[in-house]
């Protein structure tokens, strides 16, 4: 297996993997995807323990390491300790720039005020080295498989390929997903930001019949919003040799992990952060 990786900061980083047919035929690559940790260290620790128990070939983090809880530095340090390739989320972008804006879509004045308190607190407590790390993160990561002269692309983004804070909810029309994926050349698009996990399979007619595109939302490790307070991560299994025309060559498992929610909630309540964030953790909202 040969790999070439670009290292341009704040841009798209690409790993190219060339697969010799005889060696990799019918091999299911196992990839773990985590996202939206939001400074929740107990959730990340429990989630990573579960991830490692599945022995993935690779782990990727799709951003938003900080905000809304009290362990931004510890979360960043743990991600770096495990050398997990990570992209920049909208909250990471704000803190990396020492900005008072996180690019979040708050709907009410109360939400805006809680958001203001969160980013102010995070800017106060985050370390200089950790801030520099957030600033250095790339916008996207692309895992490109070269199979018999063709490219099979897994694209990792935070919000969408076109905007770091775009929300791709499950009820978005298929035409939007298809357009985004065809414009970016992605066969599999992996993203977070909504904090609600799902997997969409799109059938696209082509000259050989039908090809399959996959849109995968990882949910949230540290701040779920789907009514389930457990951490969420995704195990993606893919056979790049077969995945274009065989839907069974892409398997997506949404994993939920129990963690010490009360520890994380009580930490919020003992801090200057709004107590409402603790309630949200307890209810998964």
Image (cartoon, grey):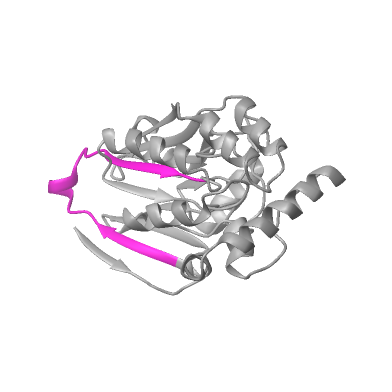
Question: Is residue 132 visible to the viewer in this orientation of the structure?
Answer: yes
The spot of residue 249 in percent (x, y) is 33, 34
User: Which residue ends up furthest to the right in the rendered image?
Assistant: 109
In the drawing, does residue 135 fall left or right of residue 52? Answer: right
Q: Is residue 271 above or below residue 229?
A: below
Q: Quadrant of the N terminus?
A: bottom left
Q: Going 44% across and 50% down the picture, which residue do you hit?
A: 61
In the drawing, does residue 27 fall left or right of residue 140? Answer: left
Q: Is residue 19 above or below residue 178?
A: below
Magenta-span inclusion, residue 187: no
Question: Is residue 83 visible to the viewer in this orientation of the structure?
Answer: no
The spot of residue 212 in percent (x, y) is 46, 38
Magenta-span inclusion, residue 24: yes
In depth, the one of 15 and 246 nearer the eye is: 15
Q: Quadrant of the C terminus?
A: top right
The spot of residue 151 in percent (x, y) is 36, 56
Residue span colored magenta = 13-35
Q: Going 53% across and 60% down the picture, which residue do you hit?
A: 88
Q: Going 51% across and 28% down the picture, which residue do you hit?
A: 230
């Amino acid at each position: 297996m040969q790999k070439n990786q670009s290292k341009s900061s704040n841009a798209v980083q690409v790993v190219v993997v060339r697969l010799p047919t005889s060696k990799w035929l019918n091999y299911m690559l196992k990839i773990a995807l985590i996202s939206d940790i939001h400074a929740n260290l107990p959730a990340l620790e429990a989630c990573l323990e579960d991830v490692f128990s599945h022995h993935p070939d690779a782990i990727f983090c799709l951003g938003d390491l900080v905000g809304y809880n009290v362990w931004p530095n510890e979360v960043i340090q743990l991600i770096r300790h495990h050398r997990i390739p990570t992209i920049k989320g909208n909250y990471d972008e704000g803190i990396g720039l020492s900005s008072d804006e996180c690019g979040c879509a708050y709907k009410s004045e109360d939400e805006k005020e809680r958001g203001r308190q969160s980013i102010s607190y995070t800017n106060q407590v985050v370390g200089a080295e950790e801030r520099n790390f957030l600033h250095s993160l790339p916008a996207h990561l692309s895992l490109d498989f070269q199979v018999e002269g063709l490219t099979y692309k897994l694209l990792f983004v935070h919000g969408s390929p076109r905007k770091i804070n775009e929300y791709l909810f499950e009820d978005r029309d298929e035409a939007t997903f298809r357009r985004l994926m065809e414009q970016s050349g992605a066969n599999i698009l992996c993203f977070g930001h909504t904090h609600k996990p799902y997997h969409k399979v799109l059938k696209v007619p082509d000259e050989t019949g039908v090809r399959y595109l996959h849109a995968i939302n990882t949910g949230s490790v540290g701040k779920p919003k789907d009514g389930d307070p457990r951490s969420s991560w995704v195990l993606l299994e893919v056979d790049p040799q077969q995945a274009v025309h065989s839907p069974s060559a892409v398997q997506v498992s949404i994993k939920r992990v129990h963690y010490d929610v009360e520890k994380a909630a009580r930490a919020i309540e003992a801090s200057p952060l709004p107590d409402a964030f603790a309630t949200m953790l307890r209810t998964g909202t």
